[in-house]
Amino acid sequence: MTDDTTEVVRPDLLAPGEVGIVVPHDFVYAQPFTFKSGQTLPGFTLRYETYGTLNGTRDNVVLICHALSGDHHCAGVHSPTDRKPGWWNNLIGPGKAVDTNHFFVVCANVLGGCQGSTGPSSINPATERPYGVSFPFVTILDMVRAQKLLLDHLGVSELHAVIGGSMGGMQALLFGIEYPLFVKRVLAMATTSREGAQAIAFNEVGRQAIMQDPGWNRGDYPRGGGPRVGLAIARMMAHITYVSDASMDRKFGRRKRNTANVEAYSFDVQFEVESYLRHQGQSFINRFDANSYLYITRALDHFDLAQAYGTLEAAFAGVQAETLVVGFTSDWLFPPEQNRAIAHALLRAGKRASYAELSTDLGHDSFLLESEELYRLVRNFLETKSNRVVDFSI
Amino acid sequence: MTDDTTEVVRPDLLAPGEVGIVVPHDFVYAQPFTFKSGQTLPGFTLRYETYGTLNGTRDNVVLICHALSGDHHCAGVHSPTDRKPGWWNNLIGPGKAVDTNHFFVVCANVLGGCQGSTGPSSINPATERPYGVSFPFVTILDMVRAQKLLLDHLGVSELHAVIGGSMGGMQALLFGIEYPLFVKRVLAMATTSREGAQAIAFNEVGRQAIMQDPGWNRGDYPRGGGPRVGLAIARMMAHITYVSDASMDRKFGRRKRNTANVEAYSFDVQFEVESYLRHQGQSFINRFDANSYLYITRALDHFDLAQAYGTLEAAFAGVQAETLVVGFTSDWLFPPEQNRAIAHALLRAGKRASYAELSTDLGHDSFLLESEELYRLVRNFLETKSNRVVDFSI
């Protein structure tokens, strides 16, 4: 197909006010990298995207950190025929809440991921086969350190803000802790300073579904192959935890699918919600690596700021950034009280912190919500002077 | 081992005030039985137990209906060396809330089950192999009709009460609807008149874990074999939905297992909650049939009183029984509002109904709770005159 036959299928995504067409880049770090576990890699690659322009003082940078199943492509499209924009396109763009007319936005696929950054599905140069479970164990701290090396490479002198939801929120908090002079604002949404037993339990069921699938083969499988069934099961279950009872009832309820054509008594798809979940599972296995799923869920489970630093207040003792934590009322994976507790601990540690709670019924994934209220919070937070306490009530 | 070397390991289970040693019986119904689906069996067996004595007027009967993974063995022990009593032993026995000094208690494994009653793992006499997925589709109504045939066989003239939690509660409600003159009291706990999308979704993930396991083989597997991995995954996930975030945090929190002996970085069991869940999965596959799990979860999904009778009020139009519905605050599988709605619909239909809500943090399984408050509710309800409105507030 030549360029002039290319049909723009979603002109809205190329309109002014949109990031438009973006090109991913690879940052190759060619020096040894030591993980928190003590294991090392001779180097790594992070795939990333940027939107907007780095200013002369190199301090207009907003780093976006992605969640478990996200990636570096958080805004814009990859071609004129791309039907689907990046995962946070509603938030990021010219004139949007994260305004690319002012900010230079950076987003990288995490270390351990599978969308271009080095992870268990990458080829181990020593064996010329995928690392599989010989890949070093990855922690949220390793993800953060790798991204800091990318920012150094880009010549960034400070982060105007680091923003993330869910696992992205954990990274944002850790950026504020580990690089206090570098990070001016931390915006963490739908996150936690440590998972409770239920969240670990759901992750463990997903891991077992993957590892008990014969296709897993102790992590040794060809790219694109592997435990597809187990990964789909893990995703279907996890997806339920990302939404809410109310939103599923509103979207699907007990509605049946093409009842006329479906046997009333069968184990095939009967309810719309079944069809939807199967689709979630099937589309996930075409874009995600099962070993990455194991590694990243383990990173989530092990993230525990209080344990790592003694107490949560101790974890935040050196933070210089102004922090905004946003919880969502219907989030039952990382519920509002776990978000509120982060802001409270920051305040107890004498830091500038605020907590905002949004009433939504979309569950954990509410941070991806199209919501003027959320946009206003983000916009206002990015505009705050970095030495002023924001007066949101807690 | 001869009888006199038999060591009683739990003398407390043989003490006065306990049901003690019980023997299961088989009711063989040797006539054709037509399921709601229109499919038929030449007959069926229900395995059941009874505790207490049927009185001369045959009207001191309390029927106990079990939940998805339960069975007929709800009280007492099967031998002096039995370490584990029936699943509702705390509620049923001489002097207990369901007092076997007064009541003749009956409990049967449901049709479609796998603990002695006819189900997909039973041998099809026509093929001399297990029915597998050639077994007729089972509904809650089929379960109820089969149990009514058992009660007829036992010469029961009326039910003093029918009691059940979760799927047992669905059966109890349906008994009151289908046999209005036969049933004097209905006590349904932690139940729903129809599942919402989230409950269907969790069931569907469990079914997919089973059906995508190569061991399932379209339902054709030897007894004791089959999709053990898929069934364990289904059970692990479902177990999370039976408890609560709070109870898991209290019981396990983020406690790690034998930390000294466990590699800090591994996909093996690290957190106590992981070990617990794996145990739940493993012990379940040794006692439950995967096809039964498919059939019974489908029965749960299809149970919809409003759809079956037009409206919920219409469903209850003929009910004569006094009904008590008990919801539990921490139940997020069949939440309190779904229980309350049942009592409200009964009241709107002009029936004698009450709703009680117990504050617990044990989640859906709270109906199995050792709770004096619950015992008192059950005891008082069984003592009510059957023509008097109970004055619990709604």
Image (cartoon, coloured by chain):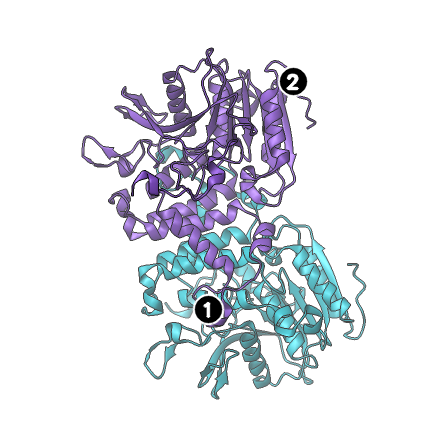
Chain colours: A purple, B cyan
Looking at the picture, how far across and down is residue B61, in whole percent?
A: 65, 77
What residue do we see at 71% from left, 55% from top?
A: B357
Q: Residue furthest top?
A: A57
Q: Is residue A140 left or right of residue B166?
A: left
Quadrant in the picture for residue A390: top right
**Of the residues tagged 2 and 1, which is closer to the observer?**
2
Which chain is indicated by disc 1? B
Q: Residue furthest bottom?
A: B31
- Asked if residue A285 is positioned above or below residue B100 in the image, the reply reads above
Q: Name the residue under label 1.
A: B295
What residue do we see at 56% from left, 30% from top?
A: A96
Element under disc 1: helix
Q: Name the residue under label 2.
A: A389
Q: Is residue B394 left or right of residue B190?
A: right
Looking at the picture, how far across and down is residue B18, in whole percent?
A: 59, 65
- Asked if residue A307 is positioned above or below residue B169 in the image, the reply reads above
Q: Identity of the amino acid at label 1?
A: Tyr
Query: For this rendering, which residue is in front, B296 or A336?
Result: A336
Q: Identity of the amino acid at label 2?
A: Val
Query: For this rendering, which residue is in front, A83 or A199?
Result: A83
- Say whether residue A300 is visible: yes
Q: Distance between the residues labelled 2 and 1?
A: 59 Å
Looking at the picture, how far across and down is residue A73, in whole percent?
A: 42, 34
- Asked if residue B68 is positioned above or below residue B119 in the image, the reply reads above
Q: In which quarter of the image is the C terminus of chain A?
A: top right
Which chain is indicated by disc 2? A
Residue A250: numbered disc: none
